[in-house]
Amino acid sequence: MNNFAYVRANSVEDAVSRASQDSNVMYIAGGTNLVDRMKGFLDEPSQLVDVSRLAMKKIERTQEGGLKIGALVTNTDLAGCAEVRSNYPMLSRSILAGASQQIRNMATVGGNLMQRTRCPYYYDTAFACNKRQPNTGCPAATGINRTHAILGASESCVAVNPSDMCVALAALDAEVKVRGVAGERQIPFVDFHRLPGNTPNRDTNLEPGELITAVILPPVSFAKSGVYLKLRDRASYAFALISVAAALELSGEQIKNARVALGGVAHKPWRATEAEEFLKGKRADKSTFSQAAEIALKDAKPLAHNQFKVKLSKRAISRALSVSARGGGVV
Ligand code: SF4
């Protein structure tokens, strides 16, 4: 870990002003990913601006009937919030599927959005890595790539976003509220994270110095049927090989509306919009769900060691949709 200055911000404006003066200043809240990265010399900030005591810890009802979730709400508090458990169960379950209780107690909503890939080559400085150091190479593309991307990857990077919570937020059409020196703006969740392209060093569309202040959840009438299915190598404390956040709105046996998002498959939470469109108006049965899964994976480009993810994703989508069609619950 390098030597760095530490300062505690006393307001959002103070934090933004400090971070905007130097591109090597970083925000810290729970620190559950950043501190590991600093210990491994992946991030070497000149200064850490501690935002953990700022007033962004509330979950509030919005006028529209959704929720405003402060960026410093812990993963534990969000997963346990009665309104989230009742109205957005896929969000609560996605959080509980991730990390450990101790980490969820420390980790914040804003930090969850900012966590970086767990690609092993990225964390091992003995290897080159375009995400760590642009234009040095991507050893994962031809190396051990069992856990890597099957959708939206580039020659520069085949890493996946590791978050569970973000998959549910993508499916729920969340928006991210951010504050920078130029003022406040709201970013649709699907536009918050980036595909790697030739700039895999950039994970998000945040401008330098911008601070996440809240996540806005719109009201989604059928979110109560939402499910989160996570498939991984061991039953707990493991990142997703594949995950699916899905919700269906039914009129009798006909699908009126659908949401499908995938985790563990791409550099960002992957919203399967074509599959969602296909589902609308169709009968909610096994055949429809299988066809939707085929559409969701039609552009998949597996690597040498992760062809299994294509089949696994299709089966996971079908399973998640089947459970949602029955009203939701544990998958
Ligand atoms: Fe680095 Fe991305 Fe390649 Fe992993 S997949 S080694 S993060 S460039």
Image (cartoon, rainbow, N blue to C red):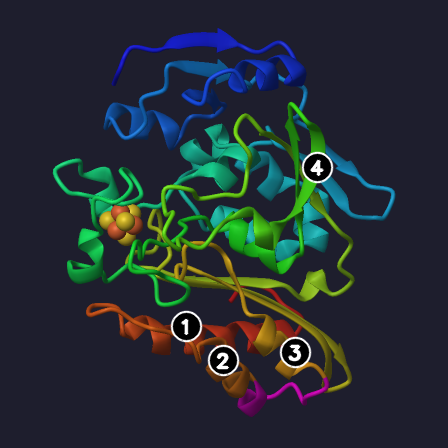
Which numbered disc, 1 or 2, marks the residue that appears first in the sequence? 2
Answer left or right for 2 relative to 34.
Answer: left
Above or below — where is 328 with respect to 169?
below
Query: Quick one: SS at disc 2?
Result: helix
Q: Does the magenta stretch include residue 8?
A: no
Name the front one of labels 1 and 4.
4
Alpha-carbon neighbours of circle 3 within 10 Å: few (<14), some, or many (≥20)? some
The residue labelled by disc 4 is 185
Name the disc covering residue 293, or none.
Answer: 2
Name the front one of labels 4 and 3.
4
Looking at the rendering, in which quadrant would you find the N terminus?
Answer: top left
Residues at badges 1 and 3 in contact (C-beta under 8 Å)? Answer: no
The residue labelled by disc 3 is 277
Q: What residue type is labelled 4?
A: Arg
Q: Does the magenta stretch include residue 286?
A: yes
Name the disc covering residue 24, or none.
Answer: none
How far separated are the C-alphas under marks 1 and 2?
8 Å
Q: Residue lying furthest left in this view? A: 126
Magenta part of the chain: 281-288
Which numbered disc, 1 or 3, marks the residue that appears first in the sequence? 3
Above or below — where is 125 with respect to 45?
below
Query: Quick one: SS at disc 4?
Result: strand
Alpha-carbon neighbours of circle 4 within 10 Å: few (<14), some, or many (≥20)? few
Q: Position of residue 101 (x, y in %)?
A: 44, 37
How far separated are the C-alphas under marks 1 and 3?
18 Å
Which numbered disc, 1 or 4, marks the residue that appears first in the sequence? 4
Tell me: is circle 1 under 8 Å from ligand 1: no
The residue labelled by disc 1 is 313
Which numbered disc, 4 or 3, marks the residue that appears first in the sequence? 4
Name the front one of labels 3 and 2.
3
